[in-house]
Amino acid sequence: MIDAVKRVDALLQNWRRRVVKRELSHVAINDLGLQLDLAQLDVLAAIEAPVHEFGETGGEETMVSTVAARIGIDPSRASRLIAELVDDGYAERVASQADSRRTLIRLTEKGRAVTGAVRAYRFLLMGDFLAEWSAEDLARFLPLLERFSHWSEDVEARRGKMMPQIGELARHVAKAGAAEVVVETTAAV
């Protein structure tokens, strides 16, 4: 088990570093000749909010605060980015049908063209990679990846269960002079 945990952790750390660099998004922006930066591209995706990406069931009105929450940025930053996208014709502000006091954000045809092209770009490259896999490999992989993608959702429960070991780790680090012991070693955290 420990070897599997080490291998998974190493793979995730390497994957995280590549994702943080946003290699594929940089290449997509370049190859598609887009006049956008990564933050603007993220906002366009958050406005569009494809179900598989954000996990919503649809029908939610998209406001500045919605975009900020979807991509985890400050609402003032989301507002500035949206203003840029509106000025450049990728998005537009419209009144809510449910409450005319609310201003909604939606993509223009230009914005939809960009999000569609970027998504198709990713699908082309990933599809080419996955085409090398057998149907059996895909049938095994997808449910396992879906299952694994939820591993960190119950971190608090796992953390509570592992508090004695976590406390020991904290004491070890503190003893080496690298930190103070601040972790309570009871499961009632």
Image (cartoon, rainbow, N blue to C red):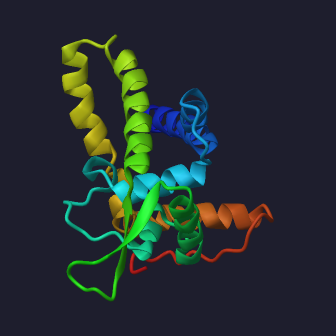
Q: Residue furthest right?
A: 177
Placement of 114 over or under 91, stated as above or below: above
Q: Quadrant of the N terminus?
A: top left
Q: Residue furthest bottom?
A: 101
Is residue 94 visible in this depiction of the protein? yes
Placement of 11 over or under 72, stated as above or below: above
The image quadrant of residue 137 is top left
Residue at point 53%, 59% (across, down): 85
The image quadrant of residue 91 is bottom left
Question: Along the line of sight, which residue is nearer the eye, 18 or 42?
Answer: 42
Residue at point 57%, 74% (across, down): 183
**x, y (%) of residue 81?**
57, 64
Is residue 1 visible in this depiction of the protein? no
Residue at point 36%, 28% (across, down): 123
Residue at point 39%, 59% (across, down): 47
Placement of 95 over or under 72, stated as above or below: below
**x, y (%) of residue 2?**
45, 37
Relative horizontal placement of residue 131, taking residue 79 as reference (left or right): left
Question: Along the line of sight, which residue is nearer the eye, 14 or 55?
Answer: 55
Placement of 142 over or under 72, stated as above or below: above
Q: Quadrant of the C terminus?
A: bottom left
**x, y (%) of residue 155?**
39, 62
The image quadrant of residue 35 is top right
